[in-house]
């Protein structure tokens, strides 16, 4: 059985690994990766809207890796439309880059689960092979963090370099042209970033498990010493 200190540290590492899995699953399943404001350019040009009147043509949009929603104002009131990335919209995007985001995040979830299983193993038993011990945990957490980071970078490239928000906003818009006024990364994206930081925290906790705490020494009772003078009495 491992020492009490190792059981505590590996239990904490297990909780962190489980938290990373939860963060990634929630990030994948939610729709708040990007939020922004969209201007109905066609409607504003038709009525020749000035600055105060432009507010009547400004809607909003939010989306994730699988779906989202946009609300546009083109002079006919606010109209909300559900956005589904799959199966058709992804064909108009950079589909390879979008699939790489999802693939990297799924790989990160897989290696986070591997790290979780090894943390539980180390909390219960003393490993005999190095890959099952600290070195293996460093490796699995590094791969999980790297995969998550690559997924996040691919998504940033899609948003900033390939104008992902504009493509999503103008999908199936035959009459109106929507212009993205601003867009920002929302909490679903930052959950993915948080999962990467969690794996660095796991590596730190695993390193702490190698610290050897001083053992409390039990003083032995002193044995009475008998001198020659004591024997005379």
Image (spheres, rainbow, N blue to C red):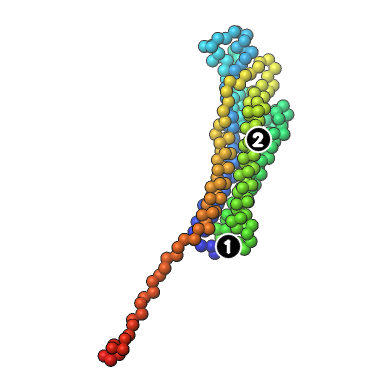
Which SS class for mark 2? Answer: helix
174 versus 15 height, above or below = above
The residue lying at 65 percent from left, 35 percent from top is 154
Q: Is residue 45 left or right of residue 207?
A: right
Residue nearest the observer in this picture, 78 or 119 = 119
- Give residue 101's position: percent from left, percent from top: 66, 37
- Give residue 129's position: percent from left, percent from top: 63, 61
Which image quarter: residue 187?
Answer: top right
Q: Residue furthest bottom?
A: 232
Q: Label 2 vs label 1: CA separation?
A: 39 Å
> Local crowd at mark 2 within 10 Å, few (<14), some, or many (≥20)?
some
Which SS class for mark 1? Answer: loop
Of the numbered discs 2 and 1, the one sitting upstream in the chain is 1
- Are circles 2 and 1 on residues that touch, CB within 8 Å? no
Which image quarter: residue 77?
Answer: top right
> Local crowd at mark 1 within 10 Å, few (<14), some, or many (≥20)?
some
Which image quarter: residue 146?
Answer: top right
195 versus 133 height, above or below = above
Q: How many marks?
A: 2
The residue lying at 57 percent from left, 17 percent from top is 58
* Mark 2 or 1: the one toward you: 2
- Give residue 232's position: percent from left, percent from top: 28, 91
Q: Kindly identify which residue carries mark 1.
A: 126
Which quadrant, please, contains the N terminus?
bottom right
The residue lying at 57 percent from left, 23 percent from top is 182
- Give residue 10's position: percent from left, percent from top: 54, 55
Q: Kindly identify which residue carries mark 2.
A: 154
Query: Can residue 118 be seen in the rendering of this structure?
Result: no
The residue lying at 63 percent from left, 51 percent from top is 139
């Amino acid at each position: 059985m491992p020492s009490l200190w190792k059981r505590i540290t590996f239990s904490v590492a297990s909780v962190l690994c489980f938290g990373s899995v939860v963060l990634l699953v929630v990030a994948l399943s939610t729709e708040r990766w990007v939020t922004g404001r969209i201007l109905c350019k066609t409607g504003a040009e038709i009525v020749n809207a000035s600055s105060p009147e432009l507010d009547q043509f400004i809607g909003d949009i939010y989306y994730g890796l699988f779906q989202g929603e946009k609300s546009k104002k083109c002079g006919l009131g606010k109209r909300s439309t559900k956005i589904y990335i799959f199966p058709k919209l992804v064909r108009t995007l950079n589909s390879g880059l979008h699939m790489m985001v999802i693939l990297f995040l799924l790989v990160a979830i897989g290696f986070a689960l591997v790290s979780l299983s090894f943390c539980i193993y180390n909390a219960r038993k003393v490993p005999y092979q190095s890959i099952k011990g600290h070195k293996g945990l460093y490796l699995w957490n590094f791969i999980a963090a790297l995969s998550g980071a690559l997924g996040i970078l691919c998504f940033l490239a899609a948003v900033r370099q390939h104008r992902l928000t504009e493509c999503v906003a103008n999908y199936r818009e035959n009459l109106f042209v929507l212009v993205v006024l601003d867009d920002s990364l929302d909490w679903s994206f930052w959950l993915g970033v948080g999962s990467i930081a969690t794996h660095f925290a796991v590596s730190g906790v695993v390193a702490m498990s190698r610290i050897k705490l001083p053992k409390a020494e039990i003083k032995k009772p002193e044995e009475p010493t008998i001198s020659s003078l004591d024997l005379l009495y």
